[in-house]
Amino acid sequence: MEYKIGKEARCAVIGYGSWATAIVGLLAANETRVGWYVRNPEVLEALRTEGRNPRYLSDAEFDRERIAPTDDLNEAVREADIVVLAAPSAYLKDFLAPLTEPLTDKFIVSAIKGIIPGDYTTVVEYIHDHYGVPYKQLGLLTGPSHAEEVSRGKLTYLTAVCTDLENAREIGKKFAAPHIQLSYATDLYGIEYAAILKNIYALAVGIAVGLGYGDNFLAVLIANSAGEMKRFLDESYPDARDTLVSAYVGDLLVTCYSVHSRNRRLGLLIGHGCTVKSALNEMTMVAEGYFAADCIRHINTRHRIEMPIAETVYKILYEKAPARRSMKELTTKLI
């Protein structure tokens, strides 16, 4: 029996970073009240008293009548029908640790483009495995969508992904805005893994830029990254998917070239000569590609798919392989 999202479904967001803040902004424009789990006391107090997040997207202002920030996770979940996960994947387990409310009667939407370190699963897989939520009650909100641009009203294309297209459209309505173009899909597996893989490839691009490679090579690197992504998706989980649409290759492109890209920034620091440890310490926000490189390599031990770009990034990050030598070796494997 299919699960159908009601038209009056209430929403709550888990997380208080830039993407979570941008998402709440979209939801608050459409909903009378949006639950918001915020475990940072400074951010929570500012949201309650000033209607703004002082740490992320601090220029964004909220109507305090339309948001319900709380440090009680169970309260936020209890009052919601749709729970949107927007915390970094590396910290998701910590965010959900206080949860005692069941999730099995909720619809869970992951807006996270990362993988659970140590568990080697995507967010959707993790919620299914650990909280017993059926896949028919799991979805994604994804696409080339930097929080900074969404918050400022820049034209953005988002994709709502559910196993049932009717549910995807209901999810999409929650995020509708004049500057948001929505599309809908059912490829939960492929689109979620594409959003994870593109972070690894953005790291590779950042490393290449830091090392002084020019636009000619970057075009080849990104083109090969798109091919590597398609190869991984098609060989690990065959489906009738078109990886040329924005939810796949569009997200890859913006993460590889945007000044807002955290993963490109991390790669750039490494390419400039920073050690991986010092580069991570310099980052003010989480670069999901760091964790994804390790997890994808682990997952690929089952599939044995040829992934020279992802493998190169892994060796630089985790095996202390010299970036310059590794990138030079990679150039001989691209077409």
Image: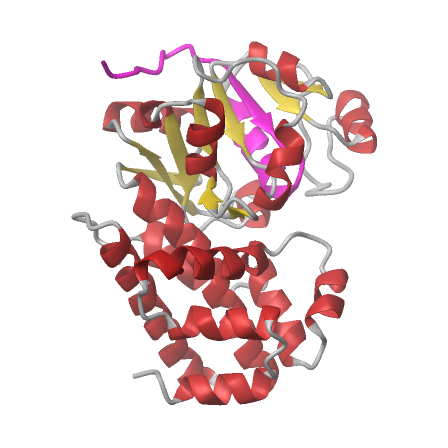
The quarter of the image holding the N terminus is top left
Residue 283 sits above or below residue 269 on the image: above
The quarter of the image holding the C terminus is bottom left
Between residue 318 and residue 327, name the one nearer to us.
318
Question: Is residue 271 within the magenta segment?
Answer: no
Residue 51 sits above or below residue 222 on the image: above
Q: Which residues are magenta?
A: 1-29
Horizontal side of 258 relative to 66 (left or right) equals left
What colour scheme has been applied to the protein in the rendered image? Answer: secondary structure
* Residue 291 visible in the snapshot: yes
Horizontal side of 118 relative to 17 (left or right) equals left
Total marks drawn?
Answer: 0
Horizontal side of 138 relative to 255 (left or right) equals left
Residue 265 sits above or below residue 84 on the image: below
Horizontal side of 172 relative to 233 (left or right) equals right
Residue at horizontal 25 percent and vertical 16 percent from the top: 2
* Residue 260 visible in the snapshot: no
Residue at horizontal 42 percent and vertical 29 percent from the top: 128
Q: Position of residue 181 (x, y in %)?
A: 36, 40
Residue at horizontal 57 percent and vertical 10 percent from the top: 78
Q: Position of residue 187 (x, y in %)?
A: 27, 41
Furthest toward the left, the residue is 240
Q: Position of residue 43 (x, y in %)?
A: 78, 32
Between residue 324 and residue 151, name the one nearer to us.
324
The image quarter in which residue 279 lies: bottom right
Question: Is residue 12 within the magenta segment?
Answer: yes
Between residue 270 and residue 93, name the one nearer to us.
93
The image quarter in which residue 139 lies: top left
Residue 82 sits above or below residue 319 on the image: above
Residue at horizontal 34 percent and vertical 59 percent from the top: 249
Q: Position of residue 165 (x, y in %)?
A: 24, 28
